Amino acid sequence: MPKADFKCVHRLRVRWAEVDMQKVVFNGHYLTYLDTTFAEYMRAIGLAYPDGYVDRYANDIFLRKTTIEHLGSAHYDDELSVYCRVAKLGRTSLTFAYEIHRDEPLLAAELVYVNVEVPSMKPAPLPEDLRARVRAYEPTAPLEG
């Protein structure tokens, strides 16, 4: 995906504790990088998670599906850029597209989050206010459906 499609970019430096015996970032840490960028995205659209979302809508968002393609490896002290965008707005779900870059792409991922009503914990339609915030923020309109 072209970098211009991503408005949300979170930069980080790989810490020693994130590197495994092979001297590359342990694969599980990439999910932490994505989760941290999810929080930055929500903050950028004015819905700091969890308070700005859960308190405002009486809903919560749960991760339903993760698809990751590893394209390269990050190493200790690398400076990484984590790109994030909402690629699709479903009826009850948001599909986020992520890329992690050093100089070249290292990882591409798609994470699907489901909006649920609290306290029933059953899927609920995405709040229209959230949809409007995402549409206004994204340089490339997310697919809808």
Image (cartoon, rainbow, N blue to C red):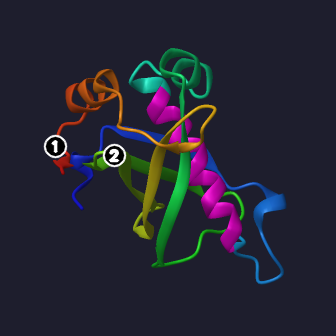
Residue 13 image offset from top left, x and y in percent: 65, 49
Residue 144 image offset from top left, x and y in percent: 18, 48
Identify the element where label 1 is drawn: loop
Tell me the amino acid under the disc marked 1.
Answer: Thr
Residue 11 vertical position relative to residue 119 in the rendered view, above or below: below
Tell me the amino acid under the disc marked 2.
Answer: Arg
Disc 1 packing (10 Å; few <14; some 14–19; many ≥20): some
Report the number of numbered marks.
2
Which image quadrant: the N terminus? Answer: bottom left
Residue 91 vertical position relative to residue 49 in the rendered view, above or below: below
Residue 19 image offset from top left, x and y in percent: 77, 68
Residue located beneath label 1 in the image:
140
For image coordinates 49% across by 65% down, the residue present is 65
Residue 57 image offset from top left, x and y in percent: 48, 21
For image coordinates 30% across by 38% down, the residue present is 7
Q: Choose the circle earlier in sequence order: 1 or 2.
A: 2
- The reply to whether the C-beta atoms of the residues labelled 1 and 2 are less than 8 Å apart is yes
Residue 138 on the magenta segment:
no
| Numbered mark located on residue 106 in the image | none
Q: Quadrant of residue 71?
A: bottom left
Residue 33 on the magenta segment:
yes
For image coordinates 67% across by 73% down, the residue present is 27
Segment colored magenta:
27-42
Residue located beneath label 2 in the image:
85
Q: Is residue 18 left or right of residue 116?
A: right
Q: Camera-side residue: 135 or 139?
A: 135
For image coordinates 77% across by 62% down, the residue present is 18
Q: Magenta segment, principal secondary structure?
A: helix
Q: Camera-side residue: 60 or 40?
A: 60
Identify the element where label 2 is drawn: strand
Give me the C-alpha separation between circle 1 and circle 2.
9 Å
